[in-house]
Image (tube, coloured by chain):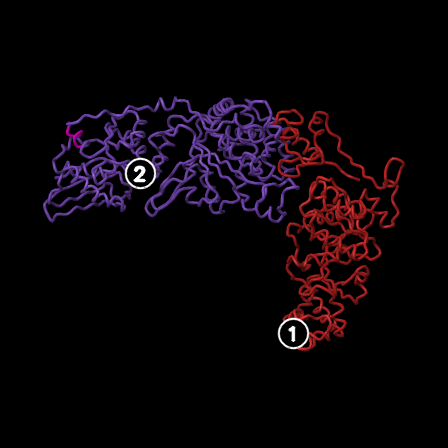
Amino acid sequence: MEDRIYDYWAASLQDGYIGNLIGIVESAGGARALYETRDSHLESIPGVSEKLAAYIIENRPDLRLLEKEYFMMNSKGICYVNYTDPDYPERLRSIPSPPYGLFVKGSLPDKYRPAAAIVGARQCSEYGRLMAEYLGTGLAKEGINIISGMAWGIDGISQFAALSAGGRSYAVLGCGVDIPYPSKNRVLYNKLCEGDNGIISEYAPGTSPIARLFPPRNRIISGLCDVLIVVEARQKSGTLITVDMAIDQGKCVMVVPGRLTDSLSAGCLNLISQGAFPVTGIGSVLEQLNMKIPEKCGKTRNKPIGSITVTEKDIPEELQCVANILTLEPQSAETIANKAKLPLNAAMIMLTKLDLEGCAREVWPGYFVKYVTIT
Amino acid sequence: MFCSVLSGGVRGVDSFPVHVETDISNGMPCFDMVGYIGSEVREAKDRVRTALKNAGFTLPVARITVNLSPGDIKKSGTGYDLPVALSILSCMEVLDAGSLHDVFIAGELSLSGQVCATKGILPMLLRARRDGIKRCIIPAANSGEGSVVEGMEIYTVTDLSETVAFLLGQKSLCPLVSHLKEDLMADRDYEHDFSRIRGQKMARRGAEIAAAGLHNLIMMGPPGAGKTLIAKCIPSIMPPLSEDECLEVSSIYSVRGALSSDEPLITRRPFVAAHSSSTDISLVGGGLVPRPGAVSLAHKGVLFLDEIPEFSRKALEALRQPLEDGVVHITRNRDICSFPADFMLVAAMNPCPCGNWPDMNRCTCDEARRSRYLSKISGPFLDRMDICIVAEKVSPFDIQSREQPECSASIRQRIVTAHTIQKKRFTGLSISFNSQMGNHEIEQFCRLTPPREELMKQMAAKYEMSARTYYRVLKVARTIADLSGQNDIGDDAILEAVRLKVSFA
């Protein structure tokens, strides 16, 4: 038991030191040995810099205090998994600089199930939202775990879709697992704490979300998956950090293609030109995962593998003139009225009717898209 | 010897009569002023003494006591100089007391004896007329305000000697000729007209419905969409001010000292734009001597708040009471002042701090920054907005379009009709517009047929409306029906009203 507390202490150093913590602890002769090393001898351990030594000295509380913390954590339903534990995810063992330990609220992903990470822009477009939903739902239905960062935008949307489809999803946070960050995703956070899903972090509970902790957590997202799917990313995007890490770890990277004119797809197109696989549907992802492709998304004579089907709701006759103008691209009521050559109030009345029928959706204040389901 | 002269003071935008009483008696020579007076009134003593000397009158070596009655209302302002001087002269038996009987007098004196303009002349004259006064003497600089009050002989004077000569009958003056009727009849062109706005159908429609029922309007749109221009055009589609409204609005401006001799009467509906750095006091009024704020200056007109999330929360919360009551009450130590503030609120905001949202190719704001920006406007405030519309950037297609946009005058005709319907509906009630209906009136005047009630219920569930939102939608639907001349609120009115409310508030 006591060793456990020392491991817990070593893991809690992770927010002050980003790098090969496992290597340092091993060369010190274990977590306990590191804890007991005298202040003056710390720097003689290979890999310990002056800064890290100072950080260790500063964060070496009394053992009894650590014990209390550990039990407090357990009572909040958070467990700690050390890298030496059998529960430690196999996928993480093989990546460069694996985390020393993981704090888990809920459960860890099942190692026998395939896993896909879906990541992308926080400020996504309607197209990105649709694709994240489609991939989250479709992959979850095939029994694939969805790993992501629970961020606003693509991450959260895909995870929510996976849960709604009855699948499993795991979020890797850049803060303590007891902090629902971003707070707008609180509903998702609560759902992820239930059932076989989980919230994972290498940082100790109570660690607040600060910017420098987020890039390192991306290596865990990519490390936990078999295939990384980028839905939308700008030319300069945090998502690209995850992609770099996935490539370092030898994971397959797939990209949802976008239009050349959308700056939100610039990063994605760049990745495709560098050799990432384009996502053409659920089937294309299954193919990369070497999974059996269900007949409905299989290859046929005039349909490439995994192409998608867009289905719309039946639209009442009298609303056709407005409904025909709606696309997946948000348009304002005024634009729609102009295109339909209708007076504005007539168009507004029809839009409200279409919204009520579930054929249109107001995605932003005053802007409408056609409501479709993609399978 | 004792003498009294009639003058007036301003409290809020109302006036009260003040009797300037003077007594000269034997005793130690001194000049005292009493009657709960402010420091600027106290200084009248020195102005009057010097002005009298320079006009050729010497104060007697005696005890002079001036009292401003009633003694329990605080008096402020500089309009008491002339009545004090005349009352002293009358006491000195230079003037005949009879010539000052039932004459209303106000005006500031300069040291040379010149009579200068004073604030609040219009409400004072209106009060004097109500009290049955027939003759008034006011500064020549205020002749603009004087010339809009009918039914009294109003004389304007430029200096003290002239006034004395006039009162002694040595000089004759012509009373002002009222031109209120001509002013009201005159062509009231507004600087901004809807004929100059191309495109922006959504904002035009929103503004029309808002003006028809005096609903509050909020516009969200990127910079350069023309939100300010649309707001500036709204007064031009509202019905012209009636005679009473005109005098009421002008009184407020008179108290602020904002009436010029070029424009002595406010004949156009006011448009007041408050800057986002405005304090709560500057918006609703206040100060040691309460003065009307922006909401009162916008009385019977439009108050425009641009960049509403940039306003301090305190300032916006202060607006809630006048929005509900149409009047501002300012409580001071011994007094409560009321300023009318029956205005239509038009607010504008950007959709995000950079202004480009939802254009994802240009917007640089992240979600957290955007929601922080939007959360600066409190829910209760947004709840009070009946019509919420999104203004888009005008497309080049619209700018080049040959189609001539409808002008304000023709929109105004529809609004006048809608106002007439509402006036008829609310006869005998204290309200006159749909937006002012309380829950009781809504139940009475916005009754829905069962299938429409069903539709409303369906929408309330779909858009998660609060009870307040539900009633706001009904009020707007009532106005839409009035605009199209329908007796019953139809499906179309409901569906449009919902669209105008649920987008973002």
Residue at 60% x, 46% y is: B370
The residue closer to the viewer here, B146 or B462, is B146
Q: Main secondary structure of the magenta part?
A: helix
In which quadrant will I find the C terminus of chain A? top right
Image quarter of the N terminus of chain A: bottom right
Is A146 drawn above or below residue B285 in the view shown?
below
Q: Nearer the viewer, residue B68 or B281?
A: B281
Q: Which chain is purple?
A: B
Q: Which residue is mark 2?
A: B10
For residue B236, side relative to residue A271 (left or right): left
Q: Circle 1 marks a residue in which chain? A: A
Disc 2 crowd rating (10 Å Cα; few below 14, some 14-19, many 20+) is many
Q: Secondary structure at mark 1?
A: loop
x, y percent for residue B331? 37, 45
Left or right of residue B365: residue A115: right
Please name whichever residue, B79 or B110, is drawn nearer the observer in this view of the structure.
B110
- The numbered disc on residue A62 is 1
Extent of the magenta region: B164-168
